[in-house]
Amino acid sequence: MRSTLTALTVILAAGPGMAQDLTSKVLRNTTAYIPPQCYTDTQNAATGKVENPCFTCHVRARVPNYVNDPDLQQSYAFPGPALKNPWTNLFVDRTAAIAAVSDAEIDAYVEGDNYFDADGTITLARKLADLPADWDYDKDGAWAGYVPDAYFAFDDAGFDHAPDGTPTGWRAFAYMPLPSTFWPANGSTDDVLIRLPEIYRTTADGRPDAEAYKLNLAITEALIRRSDVAIDPVDETVYGVDLDKDGTLGTADHVAFDWAPKQGRNMSYVGAAKDAQAAGDAPLAAGLFPLGTEFLHTVRYIDVAAGDIAMAPRIKEVRYARKTSWRTYANLEDWALAEIKEDADFPDRTKQFFGNLETGIGNGTGWRYQAFIEDAQGDLRPQTFEETVFCMGCHGSIGVTDDAAFAFPRKLAADTAHARGWYHWTQKGLQGTPDPVRTDGNGEILYYLLQNGAGDEFRNNHEIIARAFDADGTLDPAFARALEADVTVALFPSAERARTLNKAYREVVLEQSFEKGRDAVASPARNVHREVEQDEPTGLTDPLRAANW
């Protein structure tokens, strides 16, 4: 992916051996925003085929995402500084280090809790209240960023609660993991929570109202999906909003998606958000989240000690995003056009970012991101500026996202999923979830496997290849039938592989070498370019389209 200028921060390359400074804004890797997966060698020497993992991210977008990038399926369109692959952890052989760690040792490690203290206090919240000097970017003695406040204690509707029973505002939702980096089969489990601002959680007179919150989240879901969303029956007269758009205020069993303001058709939030919307303080538009929306994303190890694949208590990363400013369709289109012009005028200019480890980094479309990651002892610490720049490649300018988000647009459908898709993986796992059907009629996971010839971008997951394909590379019909009914036949690793990946990632943690890559790679990746020529063809001639539009 080529670069674009998004801010005026000047970034200088640091020399080798430089001691880690968490507050530094120096980039050792000046193109840290280009993910390792973008260096995949699409030419399959074993079969003679050209494999396509690139369509997972680079596709023709749907408005108001104006970043149409299916051309990136066809060439390595990198700026000059990115032509040599900086993600050298992909090529490290960790087999000896992995063999030296027993299964019992790694199981005990991943089952250790690095989010909570023994008394239930959130460890990071405690540390941030008495800010360590090496975490204090501006040296003012106070943390200016997000303080973790989710307790992962969910009720039957997916709402999180503090130990005293107070709702935190966070709500868990179930979603289909994006192919394929975030499949547990490739090294991590994860979850995502959403929280809307207080006005979306209260009545017009400011009283907390769980029903209003549910409705506003369902309205948000309809806006992002651009389709109707099923809800439990609700009396519309209580909120004064015709949710199902049948022309009367009665009992609604769905939120109708009907947004065409130029034709006089609009939608409305409920409760205090309805009044704020009328006052111009809570803008609403299809494909965009409400102003102030927050996401909390934890990336975790794989727990297999209980005999099944599950989320481990130990967290690799706590990722946080907040929508801090509103962008209209015109704003977003102008931004995307500026990206195109910048790319054409200055093809070798790398992206520049503003922010720091406390306030996070802006992505140019209204969102700010910050995160925490493991230190060498396994405790969570703030990510450095460079480690957060890594997040910008996926939450910046790519075609597949809706308002920079991956997970929520992939939420399990409210009309078919358990609890309408509002639950945490600790309450119900992915087992038994059928392969989602693309708009072209193909199963999504099956289609990915066929187009990519493997279950990961690097074609390094030999377990999935052996499980899904015959010796000649033909998809096994029995596997295809099983996948249609249960995606975990592809998404879940064996216990042996899960432990191997846990051990491999822990080696990166011990090294604190995240700037060289954070993928769990046990043996050197073979299907990855160490260097490419600018605009070198991938060999893919016909770009594939996204799953759901």
Image (cartoon, rainbow, N blue to C red):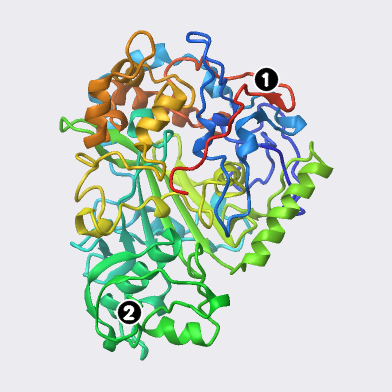
x, y (%) of residue 168?
32, 68
x, y (%) of residue 381?
47, 46
Task: Name the one closer to the observer, 117 or 4.
Answer: 4
Label 2 sits on what residue type? Asp
Label 1 sits on what residue type? Glu
Q: Note whether 82 is above or below 331 in the view shown.
A: above
Specify which label sits upstream in the sequence, 1 or 2. 2
Q: Quadrant of the N terminus?
A: top right
**Corner quadrant of residue 386:** top right
Classify mark 1: helix, strand or loop.
Answer: loop
The residue to which callout 1 is attached is 531
x, y (%) of residue 151?
29, 58
Residue drawn at point x = 39 percent, y = 13 percent:
473
Q: CA distance from mark 1 to mark 2?
A: 59 Å
x, y (%) of residue 435?
29, 38
- Please tell me the numbered disc located at residue 246: 2
* Residue at the extreme left: 306
Q: Note whether 266 is above or below 50 in the view shown.
A: below
Residue drawn at point x = 58 percent, y = 60 percent:
64
Residue drawn at point x = 57 percent, y = 29 percent:
516
Q: Can residue 3 be seen from the camera position used here?
A: yes
**Corner quadrant of residue 91:** top right
Name the side, left or right, on which 61 lies relative to 311: right
Q: Note whether 209 is above or below 170 in the view shown.
A: below
Number of other residues with Cα within 10 Å of mark 1, as a class: few under 14, some 14 to 19, many 20 or more: few
